[in-house]
Amino acid sequence: MASSPDTPEKLLLHVCCGPCSTAPLRTLHERGVDICIHYANSNIAPRSEYEHRRDTAREYAESQHVRFEEGSYRPEEWAQAMKALPEDARTSPDGQTPPPERCRACYALRFAESAEFATSHGFTHMGTTLTVSPYQYAAIIKEELERACADAGIQPFYEDYSPLYQETVRASKEAGLYRQDYCGCLPSKAEADAGRAARKAKRDEERAKRAKAREQEERSQAARKAERAEYDAERAKRRAILKRLREEEQQANRSTDADE
C-alpha cells in the first residue's frame, strides 16, 4: 500500500461512507494515528441516500471510538461545479464509466471543504479513504488532495488503500453496514445501472451461447446415437438373414442325407 512518508499523530480523514472507512481505520489505528472522520459529500444524491451513508459512517465511527464530524450538505454547489465543466467532461464516453474531469471537480469541492475544516480545527494533516475503491481515480485524488491541502496550509496524507478493498467488503458485511451500489452522484448512479445492465446482458448472451452449444451437442449426440442404432439394427438384420440361410442350408443337407 503506497503511503505518505510520515504518519501524523492526529489526522482529519475525509470519508465517503462507512464501508470504505473500515480497513483504513484499522491500519491507521495500528499505526497509532489519532483520527477524526470528516463526512463532506455534497455530491451524494438524493438526500435520503446522503443521510443513509452518513448515519452508517457515523455509527461505524462511534463503534470504533472515532470522532465523527459532518460537513455541510450543499448539493447546489456541487451542481454548479458540474455545470461549469465542458459538456464532454460531464458526460460518460460509454455511458458506464465516469469521466475523469467530472470526478476531479467533485474531489476538489469535497477536499476543499474538509481542508477548511482541518485548518479551522487545528489539524495539520488531512487524508481521504476514497482511494480504497478500485473504481476511483487514485492519481487524480492524490493531485486534488495535495492541491486542497496546499491552499489550506496543511499537510496532505495520501494513502492508496485499494489493496484493502476486499477487506473493506468483508469487514462491512461482517459489521452489517449498508453498502451502496453507486459512487454517490446521480450521474454515477445512471452509469452504474448501465454498467450492471451491460454486464447482465453480456452474461445472458454468454449463457445463451452456452445453452445453444449444449443444444447442438445434444442434437449431435442424438444423431450419432440414431445412426449407431440404425447401423446396429442393420447388422442385426443381416445376422438374422445369415442365420436363417445357414439353418435352411443345414435343413436341406439333412434332407439329402435322409434320402440317400
Image: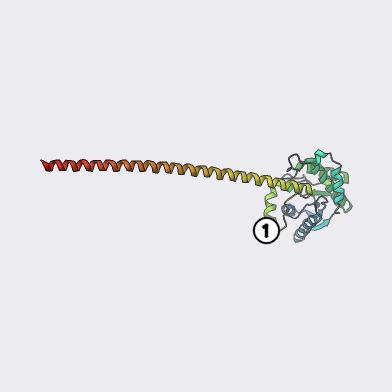
Quarter residue 223 falls in = top left
Q: Is residue 112 visible?
A: no
Residue 229 screen position, x and y as percent: 39, 44
Judged left or right of residue 170, residue 250 is left
For the view shown, which residue lies furthest in the front direction?
259
Query: In this figure, which colouring scheme has been used for the structure?
Result: rainbow
Judged left or right of residue 225, residue 110 is right
Quarter residue 209 falls in = top right
- Quadrant of the frame with the C terminus: top left
Residue 114 screen position, x and y as percent: 84, 50
For the view shown, which residue lies furthest in the right direction?
120
List the residue tagged with mark 1.
174
Q: Residue at x 85, y 47 (%)?
A: 79
**Front residue of this view, candidates 21 and 54:** 54
- Badge 1: residue crowd in 10 Å (few <14, some 14–19, many ≥20): few
Report the number of discs: 1
Residue 101, above or below 129: above
Residue 230 screen position, x and y as percent: 39, 42
**Front residue of this view, candidates 121 and 212:** 212
Q: Is residue 47 visible?
A: yes
Judged left or right of residue 152, residue 163 is left
Q: Amino acid at mark 1?
A: Glu
Residue 201 screen position, x and y as percent: 65, 45
Q: Secondary structure at mark 1?
A: helix
- Quadrant of the frame with the N terminus: top right
